[in-house]
Image (cartoon, helix red, strand yellow):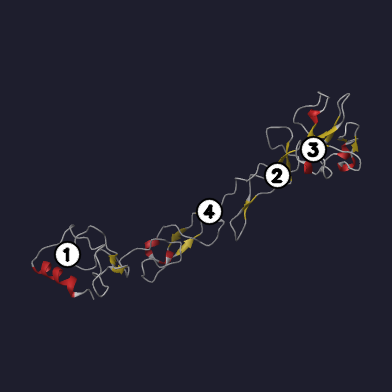
């Protein structure tokens, strides 16, 4: 029960026929020595909480706390907690009507309390792949909520240069990357380099179109290519190139693989 120390001034006020107006705010008042507050308020950290701040107190009881046992409201309808200590949590509390909730399905968004249950929201949209080499239309992984995007086909263009190609779902520069030199899966031998085909003396070769591996004694070329006199690997047919590639032939120049 609210302590006598604090209750007596209110009794005097009511007996005089006066009404305590907005000058008194029952919210934020200190609790009495027994840790109690006015009816409808709860002592939290030695401060009374729960009523509508700034309203008048006319002795009618409750301080505007509503039906909740602590005079507050369910402030979070998706945390599984009874925020206002009235015995009802989340959507089971009438405070949560039409409020955001959590249906525990990470692949839905916009869940909302309907009645006493959390109504399932709309499916999560996965249309922002992390790489230009992954499909735009992804799917949501049940249980984790992660967006999964299928890789685009190897050889798909993915950058500003003709040599920028998708390989295994990643955009790579096929004039520089030794594991995909000149095409997806065309890997140079250990210690060898990947060079852009336009770096040779044959100027007819286009810039940033493809690459080729360096080679030498004991250094094999990828996909059965042969080591040319220039010290770089050259295909003899499209069979020596990656899937989806052709063998480019320029008069007076070494052949190479390209998409």
Residue at position x 55%, y 58% from top?
106
Looking at marks 1 and 3 on the same chain, the residue that comes earlier in the sequence is marked by 1
Q: Is residue 200 above or below residue 41?
A: above
Q: Are marks 1 and 2 in contact (CB under 8 Å)?
A: no
Which percent across, then down, holds residue 58? 17, 64
Q: Which residue is mark 3?
A: 194
Q: Nearer the viewer, mark 3 or mark 4?
A: 3
CA gap between label 1 and label 2 equals 71 Å
Q: Nearer the viewer, mark 2 or mark 4?
A: 2
- Asked if 8 appears above or below 168 in the picture, the reply is below
Binning the other alpha carbons within 10 Å of mark 4 as few (below 14), some (14 to 19) or many (20 upward) gives few
Does 122 sit above or below residue 179? below
Secondary structure beneath dot 1 equals loop
- Structural distance between the alpha carbons of marks 2 and 4: 31 Å
Front one among 38 and 66: 38
Label 2 crowd bin: few (<14), some (14–19), many (20+), radius 10 Å: some
For marks 3 and 4, give the CA distance. 48 Å
Identify which residue, 61 or 242, lies in the foreground. 242
For label 3, count other residues whose C-alpha is less than 10 Å away and answer few (under 14), some (14-19) or many (20+): many
Q: Disc 2 on helix, strand or loop? A: strand
Residue where numbered disc 1 is placed: 58
Q: Nearer the viewer, mark 4 or mark 1?
A: 1
Q: CA distance from mark 3 to mark 2?
A: 18 Å
Q: Position of residue 203 (x, y in %)?
A: 81, 23
In the image shown, does 117 or 80 lie closer to the viewer? 80
The answer to whether mark 2 and mark 4 are in CB contact below 8 A is no
Comes first in the chain, label 1 or label 2: 1
Pointer 2 residue: 170
Residue visible at 25% across and 75% down in the picture: 34
């Amino acid at each position: 029960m609210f302590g006598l120390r604090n209750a007596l001034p209110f009794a005097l006020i009511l007996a005089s026929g006066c009404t305590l107006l907005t000058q008194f705010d029952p919210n934020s008042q200190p609790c009495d020595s027994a840790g109690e507050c006015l009816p409808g308020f709860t002592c939290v950290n030695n401060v009374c909480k729960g009523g509508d701040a700034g309203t008048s107190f006319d002795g009618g009881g409750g301080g505007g706390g509503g039906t909740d046992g602590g005079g507050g409201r369910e402030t979070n309808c998706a945390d599984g907690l009874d925020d206002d200590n009235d015995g009802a949590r989340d959507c089971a509390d009438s405070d949560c009507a039409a409020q955001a909730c959590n249906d525990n399905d990470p692949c839905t968004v916009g869940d909302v309390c309907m009645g006493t249950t959390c109504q399932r929201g709309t499916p999560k949209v996965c249309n922002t792949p992390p790489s230009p080499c992954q499909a735009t239309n992804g799917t949501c992984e049940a249980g984790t909520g992660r967006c999964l995007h299928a890789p685009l086909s190897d050889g798909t263009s993915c950058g500003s240069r003709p040599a920028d190609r998708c390989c295994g779902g990643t955009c790579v520069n096929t004039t520089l990357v030794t594991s995909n030199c000149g095409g997806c899966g065309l890997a140079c031998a250990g210690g060898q380099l990947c060079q852009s085909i336009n770096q040779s003396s044959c100027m007819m070769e286009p810039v940033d179109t493809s690459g080729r591996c360096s080679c030498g004694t004991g250094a094999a070329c990828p996909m059965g290519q042969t080591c040319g006199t220039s010290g770089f690997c050259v295909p003899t047919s499209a069979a020596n190139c990656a899937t989806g590639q052709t063998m480019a032939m320029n008069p007076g120049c070494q052949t190479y693989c390209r998409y």
